[in-house]
Image (cartoon, grey):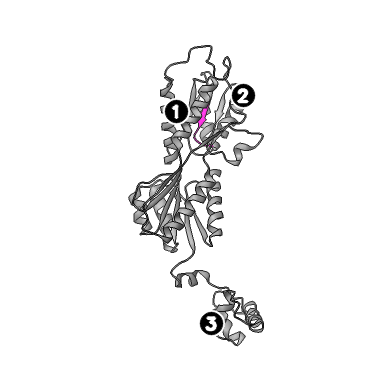
Amino acid sequence: MASQRSVTMADVAARAGVSRSLVSLVVRGSPLVSDARRAAVAAAIDELGYRHNQIASRLAAKSTRTLGLLLFDLHNPAYADLHDGVVEVAEAAGYEVLLVAGSRDGAREQAVLERLVTLQVDGLMVAGYVGSAADLLRTARGLPVVVANRRIDADGVDSVVSDDAEGATIAVEHLIALGHRRIAHVSSPHGNPYQLRRRGYEAAMRAHGLEPWVVEGDLAATGGRAAVAAWGEGEALPTAVFAHNDLSAVGAMSALAERGVGVPGDVSLVGYDNTDLSALPSIGLTTLEQHAREQGRMAVRMLLERVAEPGIAARAVVIPPVLVERSTTAPPRGATRRGRLDAEPLGAL
């Protein structure tokens, strides 16, 4: 048997005793081929181990029917949800999705994008991009581009985002309505959405005359654990914590439990993303739904429209976040829902 890599359509045609064009018709599933010749070609394909090179065929047609997708953080289930939305719509439209992992390092991120471009994808989707608009456009080299989970203002670049600052405001307002005043925020310096969530938190706190209390961590559960560790055993804990994502919130929950601190009895907890993790009965995390799957679906639709009409004006879609209230938030001790603490709130922390 010939090697799969060495077998060509011409080899199959010679073995079956037919023309190369007839083999091509069989491979494409054309109804114009008789059953007898189809069977002969199929037998030759099986015998030689031939595999049709779809990429080469698509390149010849000046379209690979593939879309490139860069995801910033493969460890965060929210990006997995976004990926699922992308694949759902892309496959229904007859496209394959080539997935690569992003990076907190701008230079590495550009190198990864460059590899996608060299695969001659028909368009690029970038979720959680950390680089500049100029870098993105230079790397894309004229390819249609849609950015999810971050807005980039540039000609010909579409974006679909959750309103991260508004989501943070909703989280703070929810906790304040429960009676909380000592509300800490676990933030991250990595990624545009997390910075917007921090700004929304800080603005909402100041709007109520409260001092922001920010602790920075990474993007994983370790970020939440580190935030709790930063509060010494003898220090007064916040009565509520708003974490920049669900993973960080779950990490904080775990660290609080290890210290014998109850959630929500002692400390209320709010996450962000509404991942499947947050809905587990053993976690029951109050969180912000940012509609990651819908962001993915919308990104593909916008990208395919831009592939068909490259010259259309840039569009920006903002999806409002929604609070999903579960079991990790409650009034602080000494307060009732929409009530005030018995004690005066502390000043700067």
The magenta-colored residue range is: 241-245
Reading the image, the residue beneath label 2 is 262
Q: Position of residue 227 (x, y in %)?
A: 50, 29
- Answer whether residue 2 is magenta in the image: no
Q: Earlier in the sequence, mark 1 or mark 3?
A: 3
Return the residue found at the far top.
343
Q: Amino acid at mark 1?
A: Val
Is residue 221 visible in the rendered image? The answer is: no
Kindly state the secondary structure of the residue where label 1 is placed.
strand
Kindly state the secondary structure of the residue where label 2 is placed.
loop
Q: Nearer the viewer, mark 3 or mark 2?
A: 3
Is residue 51 visible in the rendered image? The answer is: yes
Reading the image, the residue beneath label 1 is 214
Out of 272 and 131, give the one closest to the viewer. 272
Mark 1 crowd level (few <14, some 14–19, many ≥20, 10 Å Cα): many
Question: Which quadrant of the rendered structure holds the C terminus?
Answer: top left
Q: Amino acid at mark 3?
A: Ser
Q: Earlier in the sequence, mark 2 or mark 1?
A: 1
Out of 339 and 249, give the one closest to the viewer. 339
Reading the image, the residue beneath label 3 is 21
